[in-house]
Amino acid sequence: MSNAKYGKNEWTKATVRIIERIKPEEIVIGVSEGEMAKETREFGRLIKKETKLPVIFWDETLTTQEAVRKMVEGGVAKERRKKMDHAAAAALILQSYLDQDKMKIKNYHRQGGVPPEGGKS
């Protein structure tokens, strides 16, 4: 979250500008453990406050390692992997969330019941 180029406020403003431009329905934020998790959750709360959009915190444990493993299996060169590992991990986090949401919807249709919270039908 922290970066020498931006402070928390600048990160929040920059993120809100991107969100306003792409107009998502909800925001998925990967959360690790420990002190970084506290910062990430605070960032998410600020984003939610500024955008009024639902913010979903999703476990990102080991996603960078998984992303690197998949890139190695896919033959991605080491130099390129170093540049892409966080973006690839973010893609895995989002895919994991989407897969879970899809399973909720399938179960809803199978059971003929009320859509689960956050499930789209």
Image: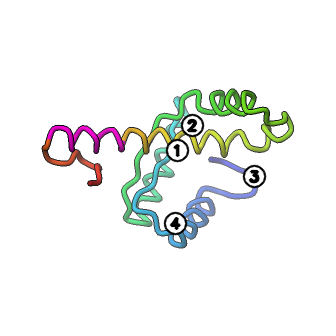
The amino acid sitting under disc 3 is Ala
Residue 105 in the magenta stretch? The answer is yes
Question: Where is residue 109 shown, x and y percent of the image?
Answer: 21, 44
Q: In the structure shown, which secondary structural element does the residue marked by tag 1 occupy?
A: helix
Report the residue marked by disc 3.
4
Q: Nearer the viewer, residue 42 or 105?
A: 105
**Residue at mark 4 to residue at mark 2: CA–CA distance:** 22 Å
Q: Where, by quadrant of the figure, is residue 74 drawn?
A: top right
Disc 4 is placed on an element classified as helix
Q: Earlier in the sequence, mark 1 or mark 3?
A: 3
Q: Residues within 10 Å of mark 2 (few under 14, many from 20)?
A: few
Q: Which circle marks residue 36 in the picture?
A: 2
Q: Which residue is mark 1?
A: 40
Work out which residue is located at the far front of the displayed protein and give it: 110
The mark nearer the N terminus, 3 or 2, is 3
Instruction: Give the SS element for disc 2.
Output: helix
Marks 3 and 2, how far apart at CA? 16 Å
Q: Residue at x 56, y 70 (%)?
A: 17
Viewer-closest of 90 and 37: 90
The residue where tag 4 is placed is: 19
Q: Which residues are magenta?
A: 101-111
Q: Residue at x 53, y 68 (%)?
A: 22
